Image (cartoon, rainbow, N blue to C red):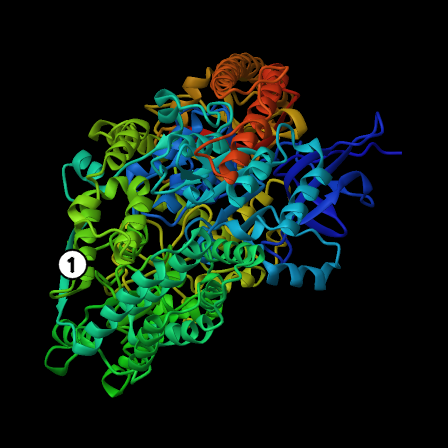
């Protein structure tokens, strides 16, 4: 019985009568000793199946075959130099090494015009044995792109495959699109719809978390009981087959949402926090993204950092500034401009639009203020809690639009009559649950409004019965609100006038565009009606949460098209729909139809146009300001204050939101200038944030250093527009199609190429090459040319573009002699042998260079070192070979080629000598493998010792900190008159004073967590460093012959 040969990554295998490329090989742990199985992930190379994946258990397959390539190619025919070079590049670009040094791969694996500062997270990630990064850049600096670059670098180095992105629900599609369009990475979105489809196809027991290696889910979806339980069942089913962790990379976007909320003396874990505590330990690497990492509470910040990197941080323990700098990348737009010495980002101009309040509007505001004060006066704890939410909603909707307020006051009026003095505890618990649900991330405006309605309906159940005066105030408000709620008010008239002056002067639309943001779907409906009629036909689009994906995508694409290509000029959008969208292509004007009470929301809106990629020199941010109205003047000061403290919005945003609520509900009437930033606690917040967010300042020198690193990487990898185009051309020829045709006229003359013929076996790529109108895009190979395109006519071809991936697969397949292009009926054959003629002055003897692929593997068949290396020497015509030093071979390979080809007689002479060369070349390969094996073992041993030493040091630091914190809490609790046998606490025995019950429970949970954390740290003091060392332990090495190159002096060619 033949021994089953286990494949390696990159090899071609034949399984189930089809050919596949091996993408990954994983050892499966079994309870039975002595039995080993392997899960092999395969990508088919058959016609029409590109991009599919198949996971098989290798030992359970019927007669799987590894298509070996252990023999040297026979030099009976030579390849043209361009084809030979393209083949070598294709094999070389698939290589990777954990000891590669400073080279970067990510810049060449995405359709992104990179700024050097965006590669800082990549550089930092490569320095980490386990990647834990908090990317806390300013809004609009490109955190999603930075995360994508880190992913691509890790994927190219075989450090990442299983990836999970958690984000707000409204950002899921944005993440999916960005990863596909910019990096060629397909992700599946796990939600209810995805689960239903999986069950229809695979049965009711299918686990969505095991369905695909790259997944996206909303934070609030996975925190639910069933999805979270399914995730944990999935990772438990996988078992410890992947080494240190089950999954590779966890990305959490808007990570401040998973931090515990700050409250008085202690922070309280949310359901989101608890979810991440359960999920994060299964991941080897973690990236957290947020523009607002600190909410002003040290305990909350420390807890967020512990979720990111439990070896460096522990909850309840103030984070070390040194360790914060080790994991955090934080740059503001002002930092980048200062480092570059130029205005790289546009100047923001905040311009209020003054409105004179009408009689009806003024009366409504006055009535609501009086009603609010009366309702809150003398309210007990439960009633105040309910009333503040209900009345806040009424106030926000009155400040938004007549229609939004009319619909809310009608619900409030109907329900408030049911108020009773019997305030049941069940009603209060229900109210808290509804409020918690309202504060969740909701990407559907219809669901959001249903939740708001539910709060409005539940709140009055906790109210005292209305007084006669309150009943009169309420009835008058209802009467005024329901009287012509669609009629334009002063704010609407001001908006129409602004549009006429700025977008449609003298009745003619110009090329300017505008985004109008609103919090409420009702207001969007109001604006949609306002902006109707013949003048606005085809000029206005709307975007709201809950739109079908195809409609949402169509709106986004239309607004991003050049104004000459699409007539749309105005986009009306809700917050739920637009979060995370990039809308800056042809728009630099934004209007807040109402001012968000939380400035973080305002800044997120502004970031849709004030961001990287904005082409205008200025962006204009507008909001409405009522003349002689106290509420409006207060909000005006809020806007001004936000502009002053944009760098600290994460720390003061919630503070300002609470102050705005208290002021606009009449709880506090202090002047705005005294409320915001003047109170002692505000100064404490600022000082805390300034200290704990202190990061390294980006400098011009650092940016230049990263830029130089990209340049050197490009030179070493030889990735440039010419090499990319040549590889694609040769793959097309091998597949029986014509090469690319350059554009000869117009803007892209000589800078873009047309794909005139797509090989039959590549036809599934057609969609990735077409625009929204089904037209095939032009191909460009550099980002500078792509920048000229503002109408979506081009696509940037990079190493991960679907077209280039197929081309590389076609060329690499030649190594195994199995691709369709080997059929002489489809195109020319690649022989993996070529000849290079050089000047006789530079070289006086023939040289034979053999290219070998050296693969060195570690645990679980993980590739540690996969590179192409040349070995060669001088050749005599009597059959002798004398090996040259490696540096001399490198010099010979760099010699310029002459336009000459060896005659047939010389090729025949080389062919006759080759049998005598084979044993010599095999010996050279063996010597090469042994030398590289020894070198790598030493280098990796030094590396794993250093990384294990770092892990051991971090664990010991945390052990000391946790023990000290437990002693500190013990002393504190002793002072409170509590004591236990073990020196810690039974919280049920002591009066926590100013802690409420939730904070008491959180304190108990924190203490329990610290004790459990100490146990885990002690248990991991030896196992974690050992696991790091095992990761770099060399298990096997192998040499695969790739190609032969004969370098001949010109005199040898002429003499023949």
Residue extending furthest toward the bottom: 534
Report the side of 674 relative to 317 (left or right): left
Q: Is 1002 located above or below residue 736 in the figure?
A: above
Of residue 641 and residue 1049, the one placed in the foreground of this image is: 641
Of residue 657 and residue 778, the one placed in the foreground of this image is: 657
Q: Position of residue 479 (x, y in %)?
A: 32, 82
Of residue 835 and residue 356, the one placed in the foreground of this image is: 356
Q: Position of residue 952 (x, y in %)?
A: 53, 14
Q: Is 717 located above or below residue 432 in the figure?
A: above
Of residue 3 and residue 657, the one placed in the foreground of this image is: 657
Callout 1 environment at 10 Å: few (<14), some (14 to 19), or many (20+)?
some
> At x 63% / y 35%, what residue is drawn?
246
Q: Quadrant of residue 32?
A: top right
Q: In the rendered image, which residue does mark 1 sit on?
A: 633
Q: Quadrant of residue 919?
A: top right
> At x 53% / y 61%, what residue is drawn?
422
> At x 56% / y 49%, what residue is drawn?
215
């Amino acid at each position: 019985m033949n021994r089953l040969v286990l494949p390696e990554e990159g090899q071609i295998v034949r399984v189930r009568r089809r050919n596949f490329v091996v993408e990954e090989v994983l050892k499966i742990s079994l309870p039975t000793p002595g039995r080993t199985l392997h899960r092999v992930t395969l990508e088919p190379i058959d016609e029409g199946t590109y991009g599919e994946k198949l996971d098989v258990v290798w030992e359970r397959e019927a007669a799987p075959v590894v298509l070996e390539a252990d023999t040297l190619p026979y030099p009976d025919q030579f390849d043209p130099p361009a084809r030979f070079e393209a083949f070598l590049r294709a094999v070389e670009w698939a290589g990777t090494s954990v000891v590669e040094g400073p080279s970067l791969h990510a810049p060449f694996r995405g359709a992104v015009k990179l700024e050097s500062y965006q590669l800082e997270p990549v550089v930092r990630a490569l320095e980490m044995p386990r990647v834990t990064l908090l990317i806390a850049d300013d809004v609009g600096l490109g955190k999603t792109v930075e995360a994508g670059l880190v992913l691509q670098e890790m994927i190219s180095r075989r450090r990442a495959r299983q990836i999970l992105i958690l984000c707000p629900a409204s950002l899921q599609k944005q993440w999916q699109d960005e990863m596909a369009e910019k990096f060629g990475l397909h992700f599946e979105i796990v939600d209810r719809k995805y689960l239903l489809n999986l069950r229809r196809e695979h049965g009711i027991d299918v686990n969505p978390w095991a369905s695909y290696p790259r997944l996206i889910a909303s934070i609030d979806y996975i925190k639910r009981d069933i999805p979270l339980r399914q995730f944990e069942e999935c990772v438990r089913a996988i078992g410890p087959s992947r080494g240190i962790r089950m999954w590779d990379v966890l990305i959490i976007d808007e990570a401040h949402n998973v931090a515990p909320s700050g409250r008085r003396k202690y922070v309280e874990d949310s359901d989101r926090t608890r979810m991440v505590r359960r999920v994060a330990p299964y991941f080897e690497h973690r990236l957290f993204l947020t523009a607002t990492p600190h909410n002003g509470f040290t305990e909350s910040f420390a807890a967020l950092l512990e979720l990111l990197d439990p070896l460096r941080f522990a909850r309840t323990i103030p984070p070390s500034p040194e360790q914060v700098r080790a994991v955090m990348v934080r740059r503001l737009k002002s930092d980048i401009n200062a480092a570059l010495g130029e205005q790289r980002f546009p100047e923001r101009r905040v311009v209020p639009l003054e409105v004179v309040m009408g009689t009806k509007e003024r009366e409504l505001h006055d009535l609501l203020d009086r009603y609010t004060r009366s309702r809150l006066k003398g309210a007990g704890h439960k009633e105040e809690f309910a009333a503040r939410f209900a009345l806040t909603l009424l106030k926000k909707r009155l400040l938004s639009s007549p229609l939004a307020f009319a619909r809310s006051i009608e619900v409030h009026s109907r329900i408030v009559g049911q108020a009773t003095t019997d305030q049941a505890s069940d009603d209060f618990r229900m109210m808290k649950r509804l409020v918690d649900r309202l504060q969740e991330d909701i990407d559907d405006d219809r669901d959001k409004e249903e939740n708001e309605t539910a709060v409005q309906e539940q709140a009055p159940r906790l109210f005292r019965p209305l007084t006669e005066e309150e009943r009169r105030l309420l009835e008058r408000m209802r009467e005024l609100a329901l009287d012509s709620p669609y009629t334009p008010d002063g704010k609407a008239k001001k908006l129409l006038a602004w549009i006429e002056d700025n977008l449609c002067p003298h009745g003619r639309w110009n090329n300017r565009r505008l985004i109008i943001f609103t919090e409420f779907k009702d207001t969007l409906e109001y604006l949609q009606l306002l902006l109707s009629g013949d003048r606005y036909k085809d000029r206005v689009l709307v975007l709201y949460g809950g739109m079908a994906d195809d409609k949402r995508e169509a709106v986004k694409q239309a607004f991003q098209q050049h104004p000459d290509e699409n007539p749309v000029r105005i986009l009306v959008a809700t917050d739920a729909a637009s979060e995370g969208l990039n809308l800056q292509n042809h728009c630099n004007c934004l209007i807040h139809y109402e001012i968000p009470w939380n400035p973080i929301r305002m800044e997120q809106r502004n970031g849709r146009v004030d961001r990287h990629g904005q082409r205008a020199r200025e962006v204009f941010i507008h909001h409405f300001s009522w003349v002689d109205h106290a509420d409006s003047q207060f909000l005006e000061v809020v806007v001004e204050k936000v502009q002053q403290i944009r760098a600290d919005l994460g720390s003061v945003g919630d503070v300002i939101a609470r102050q705005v609520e208290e002021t606009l509900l009449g709880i506090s009437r202090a002047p705005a200038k005294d409320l915001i930033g003047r109170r002692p606690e505000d100064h404490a917040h600022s000082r805390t944030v300034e200290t704990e967010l202190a990061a390294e300042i980006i400098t011009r020198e650092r940016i230049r250093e990263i830029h130089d690193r990209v340049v050197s990487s490009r030179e070493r990898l030889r990735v440039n527009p010419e090499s990319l185009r040549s590889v694609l051309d040769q793959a097309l020829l091998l597949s029986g199609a014509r090469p690319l045709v350059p554009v000869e006229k117009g803007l892209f003359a000589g800078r873009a190429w047309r794909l005139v013929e797509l090989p039959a076996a590549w036809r599934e790529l057609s969609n990735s090459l077409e625009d929204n109108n089904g037209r095939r895009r032009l191909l460009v190979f550099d980002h500078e040319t792509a920048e000229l395109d503002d109408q979506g006519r081009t696509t940037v071809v990079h190493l991960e573009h679907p077209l280039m991936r197929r081309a590389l697969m076609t060329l690499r397949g030649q190594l195994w002699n199995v691709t369709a292009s080997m059929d002489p009926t489809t195109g020319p054959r690649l022989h993996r042998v070529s000849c290079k003629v050089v000047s006789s002055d530079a070289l006086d003897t023939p040289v034979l260079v053999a290219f070998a692929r050296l693969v060195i593997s570690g645990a679980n068949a993980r590739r540690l070192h996969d590179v192409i290396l040349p070995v060669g020497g001088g050749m005599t015509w009597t059959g002798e070979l004398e090996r040259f030093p490696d540096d001399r071979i490198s010099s010979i390979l760099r010699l310029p080629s002459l336009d000459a080809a060896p005659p047939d007689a010389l090729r025949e002479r080389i062919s006759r000598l080759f049998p005598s060369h084979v044993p010599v070349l095999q010996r050279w390969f063996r010597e090469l493998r042994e030398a590289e094996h020894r070198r790598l073992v030493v280098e990796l041993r030094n590396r794993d010792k250093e990384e294990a030493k770092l892990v051991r040091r971090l664990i010991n630091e945390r052990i000391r900190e946790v023990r000290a914190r437990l002693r500190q809490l013990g002393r504190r609790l002793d002072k409170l008159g509590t004591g236990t046998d073990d020196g810690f606490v039974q919280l049920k025995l002591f009066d926590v004073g100013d802690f409420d019950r939730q904070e008491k429970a959180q304190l108990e949970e924190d203490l329990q967590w610290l004790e459990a954390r100490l146990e885990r740290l002690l248990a991991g003091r030896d196992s974690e460093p050992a696991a790091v060392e095992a990761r770099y332990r060399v298990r096997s090495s192998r040499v695969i012959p790739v190609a032969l190159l004969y370098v001949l002096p010109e005199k040898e060619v002429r003499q023949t």
